[in-house]
Image: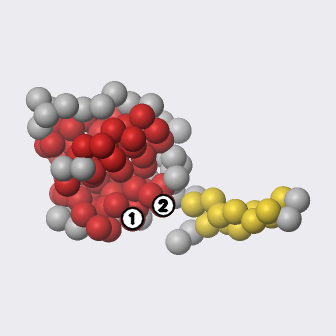
Amino acid sequence: MESWKLKNAGVACRVDLRAALPQPAGVTLEELKTTTSVSDLSLALQALLADRRGDWDHAHTLAQQAGNADGDWVHAYLHRKEGDIGNAGYWYRRADRPVVGAGVSLESEWDSIATELLGRKD
């Protein structure tokens, strides 16, 4: 993991430098769905791609590693996908996102999250 170890007043913490990476310019949702190169993607997008490949455990780990609201949003989606609605609700609230109900398909939610994350400029 690319990270910096910071020390301040005797307190050490790790900051994952990939968590807040700007997304590659011009990547479309359809291109994202077929990409095999993830090194320049944020951890939240990497988590979505891991989920798309069927690796829920790795997706979950990446979402947790993101350590930001985007990762929390993907984390919520992953728990909704596994059927743990209570846990999903916690992560939606933590991401400051509305809880997604059963009327929204998982595919539609995945697309919505990915589209918004791809549109980020910062």
Query: Distance of mark 1 from mark 2, alpha carbons?
Result: 6 Å
Q: Give above or below for 77 relative to 98.
A: below
Front-lying residue, 6 or 121: 6
Front-lying residue, 13 or 4: 13
Which residue corresponds to the image point at 39% horizontal and 41% vertical from the top-left? 90
Residue 65: mark: 2
Pointer 2 local density, CA inside 10 Å: few below 14, some 14–19, many at least 20: some
Q: For the residue labelled by badge 2, is the local secondary structure a helix, a strand or a loop?
A: helix
Q: For the residue labelled by badge 1, is the local secondary structure a helix, a strand or a loop?
A: helix
The residue under label 1 is which amino acid type?
Thr
Q: Position of residue 64 (x, y in %)?
A: 44, 58
Number of marks in picture: 2
User: Is residue 77 left or right of 102 when viewed as pictured?
Assistant: right
Q: According to the image, what is the colour scheme of the structure?
A: secondary structure
Which residue corresponds to the image point at 40% horizontal and 62% vertical from the top-left? 62
User: Is residue 68 left or right of 33 when viewed as pictured?
Assistant: right
Which residue corresponds to the image point at 14% horizontal and 43% vertical from the top-left? 107
The residue lying furthest to the right in this view is 9
The residue lying furthest to the bottom in this view is 1
Cβ atoms under marks 1 and 2 closer than 8 Å: yes
Residue 110 seen from this side = yes
User: Is residue 81 left or right of 37 when viewed as pictured?
Assistant: left
Front-lying residue, 63 or 115: 63
Q: Position of residue 89 (x, y in %)?
A: 33, 38
The residue under label 2 is which amino acid type?
Gln
Q: Position of residue 99 (x, y in %)?
A: 30, 31
Residue 25 seen from this side = no
Which residue corresponds to the image point at 48% horizontal and 55% vertical from the top-left? 66
Residue 34: mark: none
Q: Which residue is mark 1?
A: 61
Q: Tell me where residue 49 sits by quadrant.
A: bottom left
Pointer 1 local density, CA inside 10 Å: few below 14, some 14–19, many at least 20: some
